[in-house]
Amino acid sequence: MILALVVVTALGFDFTNGFHDTANAMATSIATRALRPKTAVALSGILNLIGAFLSVEVALTVSNAVVRIQNADGTPKESLTSDGGTALLLIVLAGLIGGIVWNLFTWLLGLPSSSSHALFGGLVGATIAGLGWAGVNWNGNGTKLDGVVGKVILPALISPVIAGVVAAVGTWIIYKITVGVAARFTENGFRWGQIGSASLVSLAHGTNDAQKTMGVITLALIAAGDWTDTENIPFWVKAACAVAIALGTYLGGWRIIRTLGKGLVEIAPPQGMAAESSSAAVILASSHLGFALSTTHVATGSILGSGVGKPGAQVRWRVAGRMVATWLITLPAAAVVGALMWYLGNFVGGVAGAIVIFTVLIAAAVGMWLRSRLAPVDHNNVNDEWEPVTAPTPAEKVTL
Amino acid sequence: MSNLGFALEGAWKVLLAGLILGAGLPALFAVGIRSMAFGAGGDAEVDHAPPHPIGRLVAYVLFTVVVFVALLGITFIVASGFGKTISFDHIYPTIVDK
């Protein structure tokens, strides 16, 4: 019973991961009208689906980077499975809920925050609550980049800067090179480059992010005794995760797309291509070097960079500041929710406890969804001007 | 070595690769666009110069290079999913075990 809740919640997390991150790949293409909004999210969803199936690499040890609930080979710690896995499942469930709640909350505010940070934060919080501070892998063992500091905090500080520098350089060069070419000619050409580079980001996102959820579900299955193979993951888990992230992507986090595409910088096609190329290159290079990072941080850094690199472009630093503030509190905030959920679940105890915290999650999700309906953002108004413009005169309304 | 050391070690490599691929390729693409405009002439350029067919040819060559490298990127994603990676030991890319 608890296992079923964990699986459903994990897929729910995967789904929020999808719509939270559509913006990373497609915000720029939507903002420059290289693609129609619906086409963009459909393309991104399909590429995420393909990407998720391509990620056959086993991500079972994903939680090891931050918490100590698994052995080095991916099997759960014996001390946590002695009661049929309930102890471990409760930690994982509480952690996932922490991640989802934070993802939904930041979506409501239209802020791009890292889904991986939310997941790790939730797990860290639930682990602190369940096992104490020593249950968290803060700093690794000094032999490689590891722990909360090495896998989460440092990459979050470094990767947006790298992506920003690359995008700024790329944008600057592009504008230098295309001086003297008619604007309409460049815009059309770069739209194609933009679609190509954004597709690459979507594909890379599918391979990177879906496997985290796959690892978490498989861990839960092993803890409950329903799966024993630590080298492979069940096919249905892979298929379910792939579909969940693709559907989430297709739904589109329009609020976040709007912030990234219109809020930070007014993006023109050459900047869009520079930004997406920078994101794709940085994400691929990092995963090649085993340098864990968040697609969200990279994409935001790139878009900012494309604003810095274009002479005379306006960058809304206040919006950027809000984003950075969100990144800083993502891990602790998701951790607090995860910890509270664990205490609540543990207080009620057993299956009933799991059901109670699952109900809290549903209530929070429905509540935030209802709140979002008060000021909906969807594919129709995603590209509206960021700054409130003066009301159009009746004559203008007709021509619109 | 501390986590910070490892992170900085990885960071400069990512920055280098990012600059070459993430800024270099778009720059190449931009040269392609420039060349295409040079080839098309007329309204494609601000100075309305006459068309130069060679520009179009150069543009297609550059676009091919960009697409090829992008395809290499996709191959890399797919290959790493199957526990393989791309090696440049023989100059031309080959798929090898990790």
Image: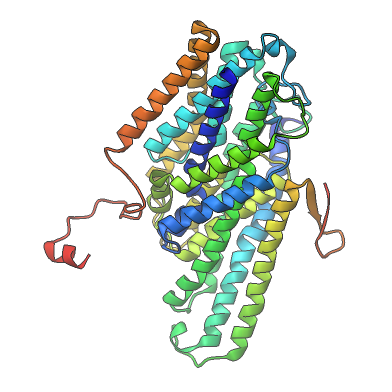
The residue positioned 62% from the left and 13% from the top of the image is A86
Measuring from the top left, give residue A27's x and y in whole percent: 45, 53
Q: Position of residue A171 (x, y in %)?
A: 53, 62
Please report the residue visible at 69 percent of the width from the left and 13 percent of the height from the top. A81
Q: Across the whole image, how many numbered discs are drawn on residues? A: 0
Name the foreground residue: A307 vs A148: A148
Asked if residue A368 is positioned above or below residue A44 in the image, the reply reads: above
Q: Residue furthest right?
A: B90
Q: Residue at x 65, y 68 (%)?
A: B66
Q: In the rendered image of this protein, does residue A292 appear above or below residue A366?
A: below
Q: Position of residue A19 (x, y in %)?
A: 47, 42
Residue A119's image quarter? Answer: top right
Camera-side residue of B59 and B15 = B59
Task: Name the quadrant of the C terminus of chain A.
Answer: bottom left
**Residue A149 in sight from this viewpoint:** no
> Which quadrant holds the N terminus of chain A?
top right
Horizontal arrangement in the rendering, residue A254 relative to residue A396 (left or right): right
**Residue furthest bottom as drawn:** B50
Name the image quarter holding residue B30: bottom right
Residue B6 higher or lower than A33, as above or below = above
Location of residue A195 in the rendering, given as x and y in whole percent from the top left corner: 53, 62
Pick whichever, A259 or A353, lies toward us: A353
The chosen color scheme is: rainbow
Q: Answer yes or no: is residue B36 visible.
A: yes
